[in-house]
Image: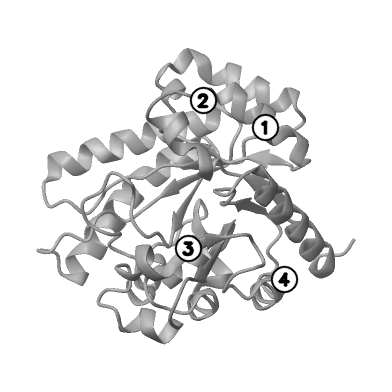
Amino acid sequence: MPKIAAFPKAFMQALCKDGSMKIADWIKLAAPLEIDGLEWYAGFLEMENRNKWPIFRRMVEDHGMVIPMMCCSPDFTHRDKAFREKEIQKQKRWIEMTDELGGKYCRVLSGQYRPELSEEEGIKLAKDCIEACLPYAKSLGITLIIENHYKDDFWEYPEFAQRRAVFSKLVSSIHHPNFGVNYDPSNAFLAGEDPLDLLYDISDRIMTMHASDRFLKYGTIEDLRKEEGGAQGYAKRLSHGEVGKGMNDYDAIFTELKRVGFDNWISIEDGVDGMGQLERSVAFLKKKIAQYWHP
């Protein structure tokens, strides 16, 4: 059966910017959720000290959980070769971080959709950089998972492979046993697209999943799609919501995942309205997993 992890979506500022929350605080908050793991983020302030990596692993494991997945944001679509090489080296460090924490899955992205990039050039740059990281990932038993992403907090431009057509092309261009997809259905809405269309394109490549939800504050999904670029509608029309209460059709999603034999980590990305919301999302997912992957 799939296992459930959680990501500290509500505490990113505190954990990554101002340091007002410590990693130990997040672990203690998450422990009562009775989940299997915690998805990690490479940008936690305390992760700068490599000597602390094994300490955090023990903290999580002492609470009966593991760290299965690493969230990080390489930018592989810059035309400057030296820039890309630095990103490759950063990705390799994140692979090492994942390994030391006991994880098996480390995120990759394509990079920023810089205005000067053609689709063909961007795919080639991202593909070449990801493939440059794969031998090292394989040597440590780590699988690189590319997410259909929206935009990293520190990026000027949205994700190059945000749209389904580009994402599917990039995924289909890379064939390696240590490469797959981290599927986030909510991010498809940010591209003005239907998450199920993307799911059916790449379901056989999905290794892990983000569980989140969105709801429209006003208007319709058609209105969202009409807005230029899709992503511009994020702040205005779309809001985070409790998993199972928003626009995602989890019955359709889980039906397809079960069909292709998915049996891996589902990491929750919500809780922005408090731990009570995260608790309800956990309960919803446990119920759905039992429904579709009953023992």
> In the rendered structure, which disc, 1 or 2, sits on the residue that comes first in sequence?
2
Amino acid under label 2?
Answer: Met
Does residue 69 lie above or below 114 as drawn?
A: above
Which is nearer the eye, 187 or 202?
Answer: 187
Residue 116 image-quadrant placement:
bottom left
The numbered mark at residue 258 is: 4
Q: Residues within 10 Å of mark 4 (few under 14, many from 20)?
A: some
Q: Is residue 172 visible to us here?
A: no
- Mark 1 in CB contact with mark 4 (< 8 angstroms): no
Pair 4/3: label in front: 3
Percent across and percent down for residue 243 are 64, 61
Question: What is the spatial separation of the Cα atoms under label 1 and label 3, in whole angstroms?
Answer: 24 Å
Regarding residue 265, the answer to whether it shows in the image is yes
Q: Kindly identify which numbered label has been placed on residue 239.
A: 3
Question: Which mark is drawn over residue 21?
Answer: 2
Q: Residues within 10 Å of mark 1 (few under 14, many from 20)?
A: few
Q: Is residue 272 depicted above or below 122 in this figure?
A: above
Distance of mark 1 from mark 4, alpha carbons?
Answer: 31 Å
| 4 and 2 marks in contact (CB < 8 Å) | no
Residue ID for mark 1: 29
Mark 4 / mark 3, whichever is N-terminal: 3
Element carrying mark 1: helix
Please identify, in this view, whether the residue under mark 1 or under mark 3 is nearer the observer. Answer: 3
- Tag 2 or tag 4, which sits nearer the N-term? 2
Q: Few, some or many C-alpha atoms within 10 Å of disc 2 (few <14, some 14-19, many ≥20)?
A: some
Q: Amino acid at mark 1?
A: Leu
Seen as rendered, the residue at the extreme right is 295
Where does the image place residue 244, in percent across and percent down from the top left? 67, 66
